[in-house]
Amino acid sequence: MLRPLHILLATLMLCACNSHAAPTPKDGTAEPSREVIVGAQDTASYMPILRDRRVAVLANHTAMYDTERHIVDVMHAEGINIVGIFAPEHGFRGAVEAGAKIEDGTDSKTGIAILSLYNGNTQRPSDDVMRSFDVLVVDMQDVGLRFYTYYISMLRMVDACADFGCEVVVLDRPNPNGHYVDGPILDMKYKSGVGWLPIPVVHGLTMGEIATMAIGEGWAKPAKLTVVKCQNYDHTTHYELPIAPSPNLPTQHSIYLYPTTCLFEGTVLSMGRGTEAPFEVYGHPDLTGYDYTFTPAPNAGSAKPPHMGKLCYGRDLRTLPNEEIWGNGIDLSYIIEAYHNLGIGKAFFTPMFEKLIGVDYVREMIMAGCSAEEIEARWMEDVEKFKEQRRKYLIYNE
C-alpha cells in the first residue's frame, strides 16, 4: 500500500520522467529536450582550478566524461598534472566486490599511479601521499543511500585534505534516488563503514550536496570545497544512470529497490547476491509457500554469496513497477513477511541490521508484531527534521 507522502512523490516522478522536455511553444514547434549535463562535462568551471597544480583524483569507472572518455583521460589529455588516482570500494574499474582489498597499481591508459583507499586500517593515505598533491578531484556516481559507501570515501578524503591544506573539487552527478527522503536518522552508536553521518537511509542528496552539508554541519573538517554542479537537473528529475555504479547494482530497477532490499543484508536471507538479479530477488532455503526459486553461485559481484549452492525460495521483484517502488519508499513489508515465515525469532537478524537501518527500534517493533506502516510512521518525524536541516545546503531545487 502506498504511503500518502509517497503518492505525491510517485506522481511527481511520473511527471519528471519527461522533465527534460521543454514546453511546446505556441507556434507548435518543439524545442530540443534538455539533457542533464554532469559536473565533469563543465570543464570551464574546473580546469582553471587544476592547471599548474598537482592533482589527485578520487574516482571509479562511473567518472565518465562521455560514453567513451573517462574524466582522468580528459584531464590527462588537457595536460593536467595528475599525480595519483584513489580507488574507492569496488576499485577504479568497478569490478571488485564489496569490502574486498584493492591493490595499488597503475592505470594502463595513462600510466598514473592508482592508490587504494582500502589498504590498511586507517582508510586514509599516508602523510607523504597527502603532501604530493594540492587539489583533490572527486567524481563518483552515488545512489543516494546512507549505506552506499562512496560518500564515506569522499568525506574521509575531505578530512585528510583539510588537515593538509588541499582543495577539494567535486564534479557532481545526479542522484537516481534524489526525489525523496525516507528512513530513520542514524543513531551514531551504530556508526560504521556502512553508515557515517546522522542522516536518513535515503537522504536525497547528491555527492556535492553531501560534502557541502557535512562541512557546514561540522560532520567533516572544513576543507576548501568547490562543487561543479549538474545542469538541467533538480530533485524531481528522473535520471537513468548510463553505467552501473557497482557490480551488484546492475540495473536502474535494482537501484530503486536497493533502499528496501539491502536491509536483507542484516538478516539470514539471501538478497540475490550470486544471481543475475542482486537486490531484485530475495529468499532462503527454509522459506515456505513461494514458487520462485534461485541458487546463489559465485560471480563477478560476489565470490561467496550467502547460501551459495543452496536452493532458495522467495520473491522475484523484477516485475514490480518503478512507480510502485517510488510510491512505497522503504518497504518493510518484505522483511516482516519473511521474519514471520521463517519463524526463528531473533535468529532472523544479524548485527548488520542495525548498522543498515540505523536504529534499534525497527528490529524491536518487527519482533513485537508491529506492521510496516506503524514502524515507518515512527521515523517520519526524522524525515521532516532532516529535510528542514538540509534545505540550506541544497544545490538543486526540490
Image (spheres, helix red, strand yellow):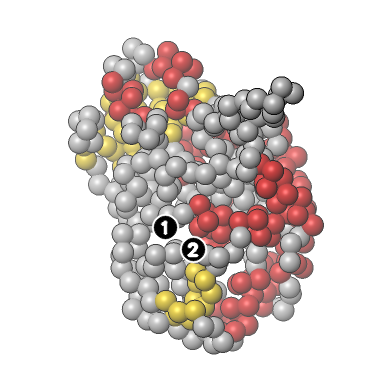
Please indicate whether residue 42 sits to the left or right of residue 103 in the image: right
Q: Position of residue 267 (x, y in %)?
A: 52, 72
Q: Please name the amino acid that badge 1 sits on.
A: Asn
Mark 1 = which residue?
A: 248
Please indicate whether residue 158 sits to the left or right of residue 116 in the image: right
Q: Nearer the viewer, residue 289 or 321?
A: 321
Q: Position of residue 287 (x, y in %)?
A: 52, 84
* Rendered position, 201 above or below 12: below
User: Is the residue marked by circle 1 packed among few (<14), some (14-19), or many (20+) residues within 10 Å?
Assistant: many
Q: Distance from label 1 to label 2 (Cα)?
A: 7 Å
Q: Earlier in the sequence, mark 1 or mark 2?
A: 1
Residue at 52%, 25% (x, y): give it: 228
**Circle number at residue 36:** none
Q: Quadrant of the C terminus?
A: top right
Q: Place residue 209 in its image quadrant.
A: top right
Q: Quadrant of the N terminus?
A: bottom right
Please indicate whether residue 50 sits to the left or right of residue 170 in the image: left
Secondary structure of the residue carrying tag 2 is: loop
Q: Please name the amino acid that badge 2 sits on.
A: Phe
Is disc 1 in contact with disc 2, using a CB cutoff of under 8 Å?
yes
Residue at 72%, 42% (x, y): give it: 387
User: Is the residue marked by circle 2 packed among few (<14), some (14-19), or many (20+) residues within 10 Å?
Assistant: many
Mark 2 = which residue?
A: 279
| Total numbered badges shown on the rendered structure | 2
Q: Position of residue 374 (x, y in %)?
A: 77, 68
Secondary structure of the residue carrying tag 1 is: loop
Q: Is residue 329 visible?
A: no
Q: Nearer the viewer, residue 160 or 140?
A: 140
Q: Place residue 157 in its image quadrant.
A: top left
* Rendered position, 203 above or below 390: below
Q: Is residue 64 visible?
A: yes
Residue at 51%, 35% (x, y): give it: 173
